[in-house]
Amino acid sequence: MLSIAALLFSVSLMAQTGVSLKMNLEKNKVYRLSAASQQTIVQTVNGNQQTIDSKTDNAISIKMLDATADFMVTEVHFDT
């Protein structure tokens, strides 16, 4: 049992290590990102049930102008 507990503890420690995320964007190329979400909220307020429906669609264009090891210069356009 002790070895299983130690194994589970070491696995949880390994899961906490950081990961570097990199964006390998090409210079002067436009990338378009879009996100859509739909949400339904049902709540009861003072005994009255309320339903709220929400739908969003967003689009963003990103153009990388310059990049170094520490930062990235981009041009961002909110299309919607």
Image (cartoon, grey):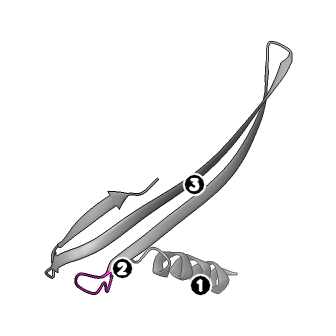
Q: Earlier in the sequence, mark 1 or mark 3?
A: 1
What residue is at 66 percent from the left and 83 percent from the top? 4
- The amino acid on which the numbered mark 2 sits, given as a three-letter code, is Leu
Task: Determine whether, in the image, residue 2 is placed left or right of residue 79.
Answer: right
What residue is at 43 percent from the left and 71 percent from the top? 32
Location of mark 1 (residue): 7
Q: Position of residue 64 (x, y in %)?
A: 24, 76
Tags 2 and 1 touching, CB below 8 Å: no
What residue is at 24 percent from the left and 65 percent from the top? 75
54 in relation to 19, above or below:
above
> Disc 2 to disc 1, how far (Cα)?
28 Å
> Disc 1 to disc 3, how far (Cα)?
45 Å
Location of mark 3 (residue): 57
Task: Determine whether, in the image, residue 8 is placed left or right of residue 63.
Answer: right
Location of mark 2 (residue): 21
Q: Secondary structure at mark 3?
A: strand
Q: Secondary structure at mark 1?
A: helix
- The amino acid on which the numbered mark 3 sits, given as a three-letter code, is Asp
Question: Which is the main secondary structure of the residues drawn in magenta?
Answer: loop
Magenta stretch in the rendered image: 21-29
User: In which quarter of the view is residue 77 placed?
Assistant: bottom left
- The amino acid on which the numbered mark 1 sits, given as a three-letter code, is Leu
Q: Position of residue 49 (x, y in %)?
A: 84, 23
- Crowd around label 1: few <14 · some 14–19 · many ≥20 (10 Å): few
Q: Position of residue 10 (x, y in %)?
A: 52, 81
Question: Residue 26 colored magenta?
Answer: yes
46 in relation to 66, above or below:
above
Task: Determine whether, in the image, residue 43 is placed left or right of residue 62.
Answer: right
Question: Residue 51 colored magenta?
Answer: no
Q: Earlier in the sequence, mark 2 or mark 1?
A: 1
- Crowd around label 3: few <14 · some 14–19 · many ≥20 (10 Å): few
